[in-house]
Image (cartoon, helix red, strand yellow):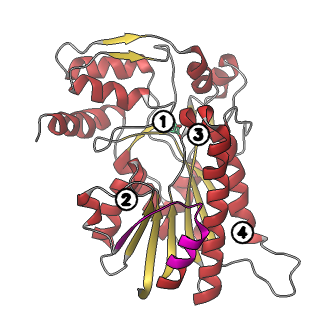
Amino acid sequence: MSRKPSVLITGASGEIGHALISRLAAGDPDRPIVTLDLNPLPPESAAKVRQAVNGSILDTALLDGILAQYEVDRVYHLAALLSTRSEFSPALAHKVNVEGTLNMLEFAQKQGESHGRPVVFFYPSSIAAFGLPGLAVKAKAGKVGEDEYNVPTTMYGANKLYCEHLGRYYARHYKQLAAETMSGKVDFRCIRFPGLISAETVPSGGTSDYAPEMIHAAAEGKRYECFVRPDTRIPFMAMPDAVDATVRLMEAPRARLTRTVYNIGAFAPSAAEIAEVVHAAFPKPDIVTKVDEKRQGIVDSWPADVNDSAAREDWGHAPVYDFRSAFGEYLIPSVKKRYAGG
Ligand code: AKB
């Protein structure tokens, strides 16, 4: 039980959650962190949180229990099924990605009504919310703006795009016909993440995972069959920059924000360029191309890069890592250490 202003992180055992917990615990040690995930938190993360709740965002009774125990005014809703996994289980993806997000928005609304302050709600959307109709259009489109090509071809992308609108509804139009104004309790803020590459966690269920999978396989001395063509290009970001952008957006003064949904970018290498860096960093990596045409089709519908000028102007998005430094200074040294038992 804590009536101190607290943070709730869903999906905290995932790729972003692992890095976010460390950042929030170090940056604001007096704000209790509560996590909710189907999977247990790794011990190093569990040591940094007030309570690690094992359960589902679909369990509204569990959410009501957290509501009664804590005074939450920050929500980082990270729980989701990623794009590849969602294509194998689209109905489950909709339940988790959409109904689960609705549950979390209702949770935030109730919390805001209870303690009277807005609940700042972070929602990670994705470049999967875009849908470019073909490679010629993708090449010509270059850096795509937030409001362009919003025609996703995956269940995950459709889920993310819809939840962007759901969050805007809760923030600005919730129960707009009620006698008393009910909106304004949820301060919804959203980033469309590019492919994220972490040195700390191994990716699971994403279609952009070829980049981190290639690095981790090389570090383990395993063969890697890259499922996209060498010319395939989408935006990527090192996980520390993704977490920095998340915290910057969440801490930005509301008055600075001109949008609820922001693109962010850092670097946009081709699969061949990634393989070249991995070849230079590891002894004899065994990387071969074995295109999975169906997964290739998904990645080809995503933009080659994104226009993130609004994020840079409104709340100072400024990634530290470019392509070379992301691999040379963060990923490769950390992944080598991870598999060397270091
Ligand atoms: C995925 O590949 O599904 C995710 C994403 C691009 O949002 N990493």
For marks 4 and 3 on the same chain, the one whose residue lies earlier in the sequence:
3
Q: Residue at x 53, y 71 (%)?
A: 62
The local crowd at label 1, few if under 14, some if 14 to 19, many if 20 or more residues have their Cα within 10 Å, is few
Judging depth in this view, the residue of 36 and 202 nearest the camera is 36
Mark 2 and ligand 1: say if the CB distance to the nearest ligand atom is below 8 Å.
no
Nearest to the eye among marks 4 and 1: give it.
1
Mark 3 and ligand 1: say if the CB distance to the nearest ligand atom is below 8 Å.
yes
Q: Is residue 271 above or below residue 80?
A: above
Q: Amino acid at mark 4?
A: Tyr
Indicate the secondary structure of the residue bearing disc 3: helix
For marks 2 and 3 on the same chain, the one whose residue lies earlier in the sequence:
2
The answer to whether 268 appears left or right of 48 in the picture is right
Which quadrant holds the N terminus? bottom left
Q: Please give the label number shown on residue 205.
A: 1
Q: CA distance from mark 2 to mark 3?
A: 20 Å
Q: CA distance from mark 4 to mark 2?
A: 25 Å
Q: Is residue 268 above or below residue 147?
A: above
Q: Over which residues does the magenta segment extend?
A: 51-66
- Mark 3 — residue? 127
The answer to whether 118 appears left or right of 216 in the picture is right
- Mark 2 — residue? 20
Q: Residue at x 22, y 18 (%)?
A: 280
Nearest to the eye among marks 2 and 3: give it.
2
Residue 61 in magenta stretch = yes
Indicate the secondary structure of the residue bearing disc 2: helix
Nearest to the eye among marks 4 and 3: give it.
4
Residue 296 position by quadrant: top right
Which quadrant holds the C terminus? top left
The answer to whether mark 4 and mark 2 are in CB contact below 8 A is no
The local crowd at label 2, few if under 14, some if 14 to 19, many if 20 or more residues have their Cα within 10 Å, is many
Residue 171 in magenta stretch = no
